[in-house]
Image: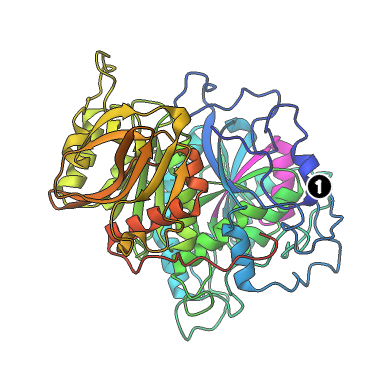
């Protein structure tokens, strides 16, 4: 499990602030020093009743590059000085985007526990209507899933705060509104601000162009269309209703240290409201955006001219880089995260469960980057060492699946989800230990309640896993045939050394198309190939050592393989923004 060292911009001063805790890697988003240490979901060390959250964030390349300007004296968790917020610096949209996906800007993960009685969830601007009809339709579509999320949190002791801005007259006689107004004024340092604009000392410009309002329904004029919160969100007796500094007062009065944010719109109100992400971070709260329960105001006709949902993903990446980590609603609800019906991006589900090669970091990072670089929709299911893959039902709606599992049989009903997926002829990309994904070692008894699948390598991947060569040898990788093979386009250099041991994989399928081979001492073995399993396209590579993911040629190989499986667009080069000088 990876722990956050620091999560966003701020230079040396902020870096020092984020490392204030004596515990290794503990920052203001993880458990405080007097709380139980973070542990994986389902682990026996989890505190009873604790909220177990799987945070995702992006680290900046370096302190200076994280700023809008290289010379900043901003103090930790303080807004830019008055008058400094109007100009974010001379940086293009492409450069702003490049800072989010450069090799130096890593996607990092941590599992933490939050105490429910110290946690609130703020529902931002889920109005009953909107001047942009498509935005209103997405709010209505998202609200039922959000309501289930809020109900579960409420039942576990989390404070639910409804914040439909500008509609407080409607709620003036509600006890939930009075509850917020009755909270005593808090002594806030820094003082509470109104709208929190883009802070050039802390963040680059947003990586989308929303200057025209961001509505993806042509011909509409901006107007006030809302009167209250959408009625499909329950406002329970113990909830609160607020709109501004009154929410901050309530949080302080209740001793709330942790805040989740849901609602709209990510690039506007969610970031900028007086109770939004910027304000909460300034006030020292531990904040997490629920990334599947939000939406942006972005028109695909505007730059960078990607899908509406890809635009939202870019804003989420910006927030993860500069402001706070994100979670998904399935941390609380289980199952699959919410997805809009209109989201036509290719859907890729990642199944990760191994304890040797840090796939929970490397593969999950690749998944996060694919959302940005390829405009894919990705869902990561992590077993975290358990003999289960809760959430595997997401395969029912997947266009492709990526597998990195090691010796983890799972319950038959979960394994049957994968079997049905493959029987339907849908594609699979399998990495390294997936050749022995669902099989315990010989002469080892599987745990009760799970199904062993020792022939997965023979049946699905078309090979027989026979151990591996010595770890110290590594593997010399080279093309197996003609270098004009489309799946190798952009894979440069085509010959390289992997620090990972060479898997001894006897290829059983004579129709398999071998792309790469590896050599270690006396052994030469195939290390990447394609085949079909029934009607399902399969790509397998025994590469996947953590250091392999630092090799651009390996990452390009995976991108190419996934595009081939999806039959999606052309191969290399990957359509990432041009690198910026600051990383």
Q: Is residue 90 left or right of residue 487?
A: right
Q: Is residue 121 left or right of residue 494?
A: right
The magenta stretch spans residue 580: no
Pointer 1: what residue? 12
The residue furthest front is 522
- The x, y position of residue 72, in whole percent, is 84, 58
Display colour scheme: rainbow
- Classify residue 120 by image quadrant: top right
* Image: magenta residue range: 242-262
Residue 538 appearing in the image: no
Q: Is residue 332 above or below residue 290?
A: above
Image quadrant where one finds the C terminus: bottom right
Q: Residue at x 83, y 52 (%)?
A: 191
Q: Secondary structure at mark 1?
A: helix
Q: Nearer the viewer, residue 577 or 347?
A: 577
Report the number of numbered marks.
Answer: 1
Q: Residue at x 52, y 36 (%)?
A: 53
Q: Is residue 376 above or below residue 240?
A: below
- The x, y position of residue 39, in whole percent, is 54, 26
Q: Is residue 528 above or below residue 33?
A: below
Q: Nearer the viewer, residue 471 or 158?
A: 471
- Classify residue 142 by image quadrant: bottom left
Q: Residue at x 35, y 59 (%)?
A: 488
Q: Is residue 290 left or right of residue 450?
A: right
Residue 200 appearing in the image: yes
- Classify residue 287 by image quadrant: top right
Q: Is residue 559 left or right of residue 203?
A: left
Q: Nearer the viewer, residue 344 or 293?
A: 344
- The x, y position of residue 37, in whole percent, is 61, 24
- The x, y position of residue 165, in whole percent, is 62, 62
Q: Mark 1: few, some, or many residues within 10 Å (few <14, many ≥20)?
A: some
């Amino acid at each position: 499990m990876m722990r956050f060292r620091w999560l966003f911009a701020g230079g040396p001063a902020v870096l020092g602030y984020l490392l204030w805790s004596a515990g290794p890697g503990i920052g203001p988003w993880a458990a405080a020093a007097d709380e139980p240490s973070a542990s994986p979901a389902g682990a026996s060390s989890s505190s009873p009743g604790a909220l177990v959250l799987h945070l995702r964030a992006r680290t900046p390349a370096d302190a200076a590059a994280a700023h809008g300007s290289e010379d900043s004296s901003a103090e930790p968790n303080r807004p830019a000085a008055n008058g400094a917020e109007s100009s974010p610096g001379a940086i293009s949209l492409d450069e702003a985007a490049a800072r989010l996906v450069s090799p130096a800007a890593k996607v990092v993960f941590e599992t933490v526990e939050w105490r429910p009685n110290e946690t609130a969830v703020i529902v931002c601007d889920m109005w009953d209507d909107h001047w942009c009809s498509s935005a209103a339709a997405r709010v209505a579509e998202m609200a039922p899933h959000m309501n289930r999320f809020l109900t579960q949190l409420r039942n576990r002791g989390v404070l639910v705060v409804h914040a439909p801005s500008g509609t407080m007259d409607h709620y003036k006689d509600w006890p939930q509104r009075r509850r917020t107004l009755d909270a005593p004024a808090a002594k806030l340092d820094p003082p509470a601000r109104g709208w929190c604009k883009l802070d050039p000392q802390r963040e680059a410009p947003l990586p989308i162009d929303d200057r025209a309002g961001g509505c993806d329904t042509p011909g509409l004029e901006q107007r006030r269309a809302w009167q209250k919160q959408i009625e499909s969100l329950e406002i329970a007796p113990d909830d609160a209703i607020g709109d501004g500094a009154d929410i901050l007062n309530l949080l302080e009065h209740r001793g709330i240290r942790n805040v989740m944010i849901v609602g709209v719109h990510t690039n506007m109100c969610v970031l900028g409201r007086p109770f939004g992400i910027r304000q909460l971070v300034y006030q020292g709260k531990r904040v997490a955006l629920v990334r599947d329960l939000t939406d942006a105001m972005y028109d695909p006709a505007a730059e960078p001219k990607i899908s509406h949902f890809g635009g939202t993903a870019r804003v989420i990446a910006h927030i993860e880089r500069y402001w706070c980590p994100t979670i998904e609603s399935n941390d609380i609800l289980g199952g699959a995260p919410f997805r809009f019906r209109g989201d036509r991006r290719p859907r890729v589900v990642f199944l990760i469960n191994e304890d040797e090669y840090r796939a929970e970091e490397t593969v999950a990072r690749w998944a996060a980057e694919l959302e940005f670089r390829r405009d894919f929709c990705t869902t990561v299911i992590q077993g975290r060492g358990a003999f289960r893959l809760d959430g595997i039902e997401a395969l029912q709606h997947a266009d492709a699946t990526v597998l990195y599992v090691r010796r983890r049989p799972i319950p038959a009903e979960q394994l049957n989800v994968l079997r049905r997926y493959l029987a339907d002829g849908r594609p699979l990309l399998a990495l390294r230990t997936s050749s022995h994904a669902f099989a315990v070692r010989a002469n080892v008894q599987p745990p009760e309640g799970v199904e062993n699948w020792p022939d997965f390598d023979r049946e699905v991947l078309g090979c027989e896993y026979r151990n591996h060569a010595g770890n110290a040898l590594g593997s010399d990788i080279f093309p197996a045939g003609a270098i004009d093979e489309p799946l190798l386009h952009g894979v440069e250099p085509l010959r390289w050394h992997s620090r990972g041991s060479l898997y001894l994989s006897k290829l059983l399928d004579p129709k398999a198309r071998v792309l790469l081979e590896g050599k270690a001492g006396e052994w030469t073995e195939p290390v990447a190939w394609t085949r079909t399993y029934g009607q399902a396209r399969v790509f397998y590579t025994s590469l996947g050592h953590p250091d392999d993911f630092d090799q651009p040629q390996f990452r390009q190989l995976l991108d190419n393989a996934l595009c081939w499986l999806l039959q999606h667009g052309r191969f290399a080069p990957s359509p990432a923004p041009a690198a910026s000088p600051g990383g």
